[in-house]
Every structure is written in C-alpha cells, then in structure tokens.
Amino acid sequence: MHTSERITQSDFVYRRRQDSKSEVLSFSEAYPDYHPQDRVGLVSPRLEDGVFGLAGAVLGLATGFYDCLRSNGGEFFNYPQHHVLIGGRDVRVLTRNGDRDLSVAEMGSAWGWLDVWPETNWHLCPATPAGMLEAAFRLQVNRLFWPASFMPGTVDKPLSHYAYKLLSGRLKSVWYYDCEDGHLDVRASGPAADVIRESLERLPHGSRETNRDSNAAGQPWFENRFKPVEPEAFLEDMSVCFRDE
C-alpha cells in the first residue's frame, strides 16, 4: 500500500467557503461520523471523470482510513472499502475519447494508484444514473461521490421503492463534484499531489491528455471542489430512478 507510507493528513487542506469568508476544516469536520469500515462509492461515468474530479478527496479519505489503523498500533495490511463505478459494458469502457476496449488493468490502474484496490473494487456499470444507483445500492455504499451534471432523464427500468428507502437509511453523505456552485475545497499538496499526478499518468494513452485540470501539472498542489448535499436531497434529485410505492 504505497500511500500509507507516503501521505499524511498534513498534505491536505479542507476549506469551506461561505459568501466572502472561508473556514479551514479538520478531517473529522469534512467527513462527519467517519468510520474505517465506511463503504465509499466513486461514480465516474467516464473513466477519467473521477480521477480528475475527486482524486484529492479519495486520497484524503484513504489517509483517514490508514490513520485509524495506525492508531491501533502494530503492522497492518488492509485497504479502504472504496469502490469506483465506471461507465461501460463488457470490455467497452466509456472514456472522454469515446468507448474503448480496455483490459481490467488498463481500466483500473489510475484508480489503484489512489488506493482504490484490489481490482474487485473497480466496477463496470451502465453509464446512467439509474445504473450507477443500482450498483451503489448493491454494494451497500454509505458515502457517495457523484458528478453534479449527471442527472436522470427518462428511466426505462426504475429501481424498487425499497431501494430508495434503504439508500435513504444507509447514506451518510453525498458530495457532488465538478460543480460550479461547490463550496467545499479539498487541496492536496506535497506527496499527495505527487501521487495524483502519478495516477493521471497511469490513465490509458489518450485519456491522460484530455481535459486535464490546469493545476494537475506544474503546480505544487491539486485542488477539487465539491458541493455536499443531504442524502434525502440527493435522492429527491434521483427520484425518477425509483418506482413509487
């Protein structure tokens, strides 16, 4: 596990902005009620979306996980229960350069570098909000990261109403990413920023050059912006994906 030996929480700054003011948060304030057995769902409709949009948050959470293990003393071998949901079907993976035939290793290498591992934590899912919700439900996710623009339209096969109710009871937090109105920033610097840049270089050829965030290269830091929303508000946004009672 490479990041547990390279990264500490001092490599991250969590900042909440409100009006013209900003407030620096601790890890526990940014992720209330965190538990090392949290199951985190990282929704990435295209392979690169989540790597570009939420790598800092993923590494911050992984570091929090390792901090919990370190606090217990002794050696450990474990990985956080982080699951990436990537749009695609069979071996066809949706990328920002179109559908591509990728091996499991090619699909997941960048994510594995962010300690989303082993490969059983890389899930190819229908690139629809309903398909991703079904996967999050099946994996019993309780923290969810979701692209802000990834909203449902017409849904051919809505999920059951009990899926809605169970997700409502399970979800601790939902963060929208790639959003214009985000007010929570996660900045990774030092070794954490280095790991993110290394992860970007592990994307398949043609993906790493596409829509690269301007601070991903040549800067000593890497920053993502999020909009935390209440789980009930998120599920209301997704309500068309569920059948009525």
Image (spheres, rainbow, N blue to C red):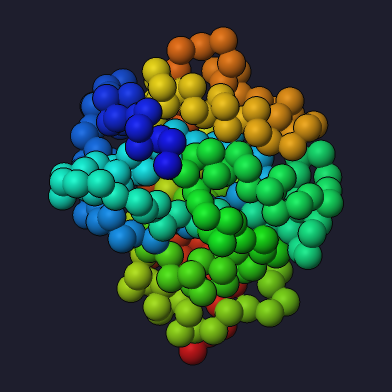
Tell me if 207 is positioned left or right of 213 in this view: right
Residue 173 visible to an observer of this rendering: yes
Instruction: Write the residue at 33% across / 73% down.
Output: 169
Tell me if 105 is positioned left or right of 219 in this view: right
Residue in the foreground of this view, choosing between 139 and 169: 139
Instruction: Write the residue at 35% across / 32% down.
Output: 5
Tell me if 29 is positioned left or right of 190 in this view: left
Q: In this rendering, is residue 111 above or below 207? A: below
Residue 243 location, quadrant: bottom right
Residue in the foreground of this view, choosing between 93 and 134: 93
Residue 157 location, quadrant: bottom right
Residue 222 visible to an observer of this rendering: no
Instruction: Write the residue at 35% across / 70% down.
Output: 170
Image location of residue 110, percent across then percent down: 60, 39
Hey, which residue is sitting farthest bottom in the picture? 245
Q: In this rendering, is residue 96 above or below 229? A: above
Image location of residue 42, percent across then percent down: 51, 52
Image location of residue 52, percent across then percent down: 58, 34
Instruction: Write the residue at 39% across / 18% down.
Output: 190
Image location of residue 237, percent across then percent down: 51, 61
Residue in the foreground of this view, choosing between 150 and 172: 172
